[in-house]
Amino acid sequence: MSGQSPAVVSASKLGLTFQTNDGPVQALSNVDLTIGKGEFVSFIGPSGCGKTTLLRVIADLEKPTSGTISVNGISPEQAREKRAYGYVFQAAALFPWRTIERNVALPLEIIGLSQAEQAERIKRTLELVNLSGFEKKYPWQLSGG
């Protein structure tokens, strides 16, 4: 990657095997992946092929059983602890009684950011997902798609 910025996500020979009552289940095997800054990446495949598992490993929600992985040049655990990324779960995890901006603000409130910093991050986040102008709406007032 000479002349390019370092990888945001880099995995080499990544594997994850779950131990179940029915025996081991190999969810990931020998995954090599490099994602550069600003790249848009999609994981496409049939149900059960490991797409969500790979995302969970990147986000440090699962630990690989083999290989190596880094996020912004550090371990996924260190990146999570530094809050170096965001993760949106597959199923909606919004509180229906909170407006869109208050749902976005929740983790910012939890970590104790000032109101001014919260407002700036909420604005940037909603712009990023083309939801500017919907700040005062509730989740049920927006399309799920």
Image: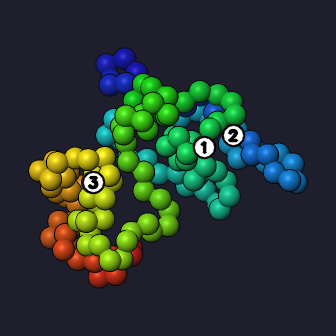
Question: Mark 1 or mark 2, which has the lower sequence index?
Answer: 2
Across and down, in percent, residue 24 comes to 82, 45
Q: Does residue 130 appear to the left or right of 80 in the view shown?
A: left
Q: Residues within 10 Å of mark 2 (few under 14, many from 20)?
A: many
Report, in whole angstroms, how far the alpha carbon at label 3 lies from the one at label 1. Answer: 26 Å
Foreground pick, 35 / 16 = 16
Relative to 15, say whether 19 is above or below: below
The residue indicated by pointer 3 is: 109
Q: Which quadrant, please, contains the N terminus?
A: top left
Relative to 91, say whether 80 is above or below: above
Q: Which quadrant, please, contains the C terminus?
A: bottom left
Answer whether residue 19 is visible to the viewer in this image. yes
SS label for mark 2: strand
Q: Residues within 10 Å of mark 1 (few under 14, many from 20)?
A: some
The residue at the far right in this view is: 22
Q: In the image, which disc is placed on residue 115?
A: none
Foreground pick, 137 / 45 = 137
The residue indicated by pointer 1 is: 62
Q: In the image, which disc is placed on residue 16?
A: 2
Answer whether residue 8 is visible to the viewer in this image. no
SS label for mark 3: helix
Q: Could you tell me which residue is drawn at 37 percent across and 24 percent down? A: 6
Across and down, in percent, residue 144 comes to 39, 75
Across and down, in percent, residue 37 comes to 33, 35
The residue at the far top in this view is: 2
Q: Nearer the viewer, mark 3 or mark 1?
A: 3
